[in-house]
Image (cartoon, rainbow, N blue to C red):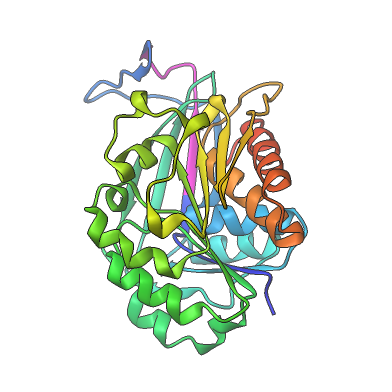
Amino acid sequence: MYDLISVGNISIDLYYKGKSFTKNKERFLLAIGGKYYADYFHEDVGGGGVNVAVGVSKLGLRTAVFGKIGNNPYKDVVLKKLTDKKVSTEFCQIENDYYKISSILLAENGERTIIHYETPSRLLKEFLLHKDLKKAKNIYFSPLEHLDLYEKKKMITYLKGDQTLTFVNLSALDCRRPVKELINFFEALDVLIINAYEFSDLIKRPYGKIDFKKLEIKLPYLKDRILIITDAQKGSHGYFQGKVYFQEAVTPKKIVDTTGCGDAYTAGFIAQYIKSGNVESSMYLGAKYAAEKLGRIGAN
């Protein structure tokens, strides 16, 4: 029995850092026909499903990831890295001619530019064949931009039992959908974790006009569910049963890589909430683990 099965993307991440990468303010300036030499290279696994599964595992719980891995030269690398990180690969789906790769250019301040490629693919058919996925005590469902809300709800409902908590992170595209399309979907989740700009899209209100400390949740389908809104260095807010919680961002000694910071917060929150059922302590561990992640290269 797994404490958490994380449903989402599995990628191979290739990091490059070099003084020859020309920059102007917040942009890399790479010439067409140019050639640039990296002073540092790092290879690791990433993707929303992996990052949360790895984080929750590092925080002491038993996890598995469900997602696709390409039957290509990176397959054995990905499987070994997941095993080394103590994440079960029992539910990984191997697909021929499938690639999911991110090349990440790192700046000295930890910010990054990502060049991403993913082979068009579907997840639902294989998912429904996996009855053992119901072994999860809890599930996390990452954004998965290529799935529509109907497919997502079908997958979540398939997994969810009477005792299973469902933690969900919506994609930016989902948050921009009409409210009437979201109402039915929210019946399938227990905890919604999104960033402040995604929440702005969700409630159709400009980010700058939202007072998160005095926010009145007027979305009736969220009243019995936990809502966590992260806002980078401004901290995070939680809303549950009429209470508003605030957690300051934890500042790392040095920001090395911002990749996966949101997933790290999610992992910390989920791990602590599974253990304690306490929103405040879960938000604190989310912020603390996100700060730890900022201090190292890699998405998890």
Q: Where does the image place residue 272, in percent across and percent down from the top left?
A: 72, 53
Residue 194 horizontal side relative to residue 148, left or right: right
Tell how many labels: 0
Residue at point 56% right, 35% down?
236
Residue at point 51% right, 58% down?
225
**Is residue 119 among what the camera can see?**
no
The quarter of the image holding the N terminus is bottom right
**Is 197 located above or below residue 202 in the figure?**
above
Q: Residue furthest top?
A: 25
**Is residue 167 among what the camera can see?**
yes
Of residues 113 and 99, which is closer to you in this image? 113
Residue at point 62% right, 62% down?
82
Q: Where does the image place residue 102, in percent across and percent down from the top left?
A: 41, 46
Residue 92 horizontal side relative to residue 209, left or right: right
Q: Where does the image place residue 256, in percent across and percent down from the top left?
A: 60, 27
Based on the picture, tell me whether residue 104 belongs to the magenta stretch.
no
Tell me which segment is drawn in magenta.
Answer: 13-23
Of residues 92 and 206, which is closer to you in this image? 206
**Is 22 located above or below residue 227 in the figure?**
above
Q: In the rendered image, which quarter is residue 295 located in?
A: top right
Q: Where does the image place residue 284, in percent across and percent down from the top left?
A: 70, 39
Based on the picture, tell me whether residue 16 belongs to the magenta stretch.
yes
Of residues 205 and 253, which is closer to you in this image? 205
Q: In the rendered image, which quarter is residue 149 located in?
A: bottom left
Q: In the rendered image, which quarter is residue 185 located in?
A: bottom left
**Is 174 located above or below residue 213 in the figure?**
below
